[in-house]
Image (spheres, coloured by chain):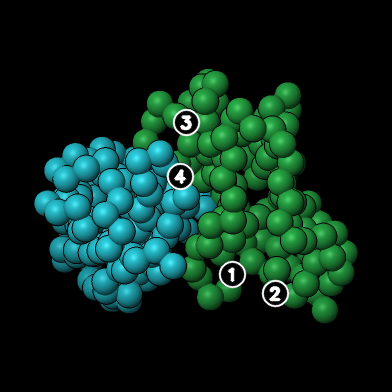
Chain colours: A green, B cyan
Amino acid sequence: AQKVTQAQTEISVVEKEDVTLDCVYETRDTTYYLFWYKQPPSGELVFLIRRNSFDEQNEISGRYSWNFQKSTSSFNFTITASQVVDSAVYFCALSEARDDKIIFGKGTRLHILP
Amino acid sequence: DAGITQSPRHKVTETGTPVTLRCHQTENHRYMYWYRQDPGHGLRLIHYSYGVKDTDKGEVSDGYSVSRSKTEDFLLTLESATSSQTSVYFCAISGLDLGDQYFGPGTRLLVL
């Protein structure tokens, strides 16, 4: 069965520090998709990235970067030079290609302190 | 932004009453989903639809039913609301390849 684990329930860092959010997944499928979503204090869910299982290249988007490692079943998310506006709950999610469902981790609440 | 709306946005109801939440999309996407979000549980899938009149259960489907009679609308019904169904409900849509999944703004439901 597919499963997503975000072991870090809550993280606090001081502004401008780098921070990495961990995501470990389980799947029996060889074809799958991984996602990250952001939920700011306003409550909406914002799509950040999707990765398929055949693309292990790291992705960078501004201060955000993602490290996908199939060998450790991990899809970690790093924010460089964090800012207060990065404070949010971040969700990692997984979808198997043979399934129509997307399963979410429980989320990591990130506090960026000024 | 993806064209996806939810109604109502807030609702207070009493135990035992029926409640229907509506999700409406203007993107003509095939897949539609209902999730609930609770502290400590993240997002949990209730039901989803892969086409008109085609629906399936998620991980927390007990006490909920859904219907999709048109591509653009996906209804979630609580036949007899209970306090354990107090939650924030999110609708989501995605295209054929299960690409980017876009979420609605959420509905806060309080069952007294």
Answer with mark 1 or mark 3, whichever residue precedes in sequence.
1
Circle 2 marks a residue in which chain?
A: A
Q: Amino acid at mark 1?
A: Pro
Which residue is labeled 2 in the image? Answer: A85
**Amino acid at pointer 3:** Glu
Circle 1 sits on which residue? A40
Chain hosting mark 3: A
Is label 2 in contact with label 1 (beta carbons under 8 Å)?
yes
The residue carrying mark 4 is B99
Compared across the picture, whether B38 is left or right of A114 comes to left
Q: Residue furthest left?
A: B69
| Image depth: mark 4 or mark 2 in front | 4
Q: Quadrant of residue B78?
A: bottom left
Residue B110, horizontal then vertical, whole percent: 33, 71
Structural distance between the alpha carbons of marks 4 and 2? 26 Å
Give the image quarter of residue A50: top right
